[in-house]
Image: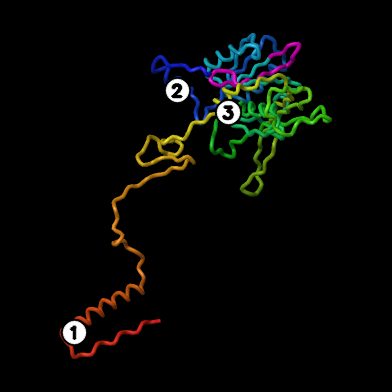
Amino acid sequence: MLRTVKPRNARSKRALEAREAKEVEDVRTAIFVKGTHTGEIVNGVMKELMALKRPDAISFSKKNAIHPFEDASSLEFWAGKNDASMFLMGQSTKKRPAGLVLARMFDARVLDMCEFGVDRFVSMGEFKTPKSTPGHKPMIHFASELFDTHPRFIQVKSLLMDFFNGEVIEEICLSGLEHVISVSLAPSPAPSQPLPPILSTSLEEEENVANLPKIHIRTYTVSLLPSGTRIPRVELREMGPFLDLSLRRHQPPDPEMWKAALRRPKLKKQDLEKGLGKKKKNMEVDEMGDLRGRVHIAKQDLGKLQTRKMKGLKSLGRENDHGEDGDHDHGEDSEGEEPRLKRRKRD
């Protein structure tokens, strides 16, 4: 069962309500933690990734003896204290050199983790090109169908999307798109044993990670050039960093926790997204999310309802009225006079 924390006073209650799950989540804050032994490559990778993540990044300057796959208590403590939901840990050992661990949290508990090995790293400083503005929302491109079919790469795609994705917005100015993060896969090292093209429902069957292709992460800046039309011409320039990563260990999410993380609130009668604000009388949101209102009016007399006026019906009614009145008058006053001839109807 998930842990429930009861507030002790009004201040702690407001703090807990601010950290509760929302329909549209806030920007995920990432904490960068260094292990006891880090090399030049790990330090450079963490520095470059932190530059892409700013300003939603927190860096720990001191080294920490952490082993997230064995004991994640330190991560849970830091997540609750700093209100962070992502961790990037770097550590280099003899058994696993140049290692990165990307962890995701839910309710201050570890949801899932994935470990990578840095095989190649090219820094931003080696590209003499303009850089993007910190804090701008990147465009992310995944160039392989395995990111939608293979369980390991589905997890990697989800982690990278949560790590790099910024604030959830409905629209953006064209000039605000400054850089692109492209994620692709290298050719499989064992072409004679292709990976299964369909999605596997069981994550308990571990595959040999040596047969999985490497992940290539490339970052480009977007240049909008005049094209003579309203749509500009787009060019991509290498910005860096460039990373070649290989998959190592991973920890799948707990089914109960994963179900709670994906749970979405039901539609309420007062829905802020539909403009209701506080509950208003005779207004509601149906199951499809449409705003519906009910109007109460008095009982109407349909006999006095004004309909569309037609010229033919109007003249015919007048003639009938005059004819009835004329017959009545002639019968009383002038009985010897001959009745008037009726007008012929115009065709």
Tell me the residue that label 2 is attached to.
Answer: 17
Image coords of residue 111 (percent x, y): 60, 21
Q: Which mark is first along the chain, 1 or 2? A: 2
- Residue 335, by quadrant, is bottom left
Tell me the residue that label 3 is attached to.
Answer: 135
Q: Is residue 102 a member of the stretch shown in magenta? A: yes
Pick the front one: 179 or 68: 68
Q: Callout 2: few (<14), some (14-19), or many (20+) C-alpha neighbours within 10 Å?
A: few
Rounded to the nearest angstrom, the CA distance separating label 2 from label 1 is: 91 Å
Q: Which mark is first along the chain, 3 or 1? A: 3
Q: Which region is colored magenta?
A: 91-111
User: Which of the colour schemes (rainbow, by chain, secondary structure, one colour) is used?
Assistant: rainbow
Tell me the residue that label 1 is attached to.
Answer: 331
Whether residue 18 sits left or right of residue 164 in the image: it is left
Whether residue 40 sits left or right of residue 20 in the image: it is right
Q: Which mark is first along the chain, 3 or 2? A: 2
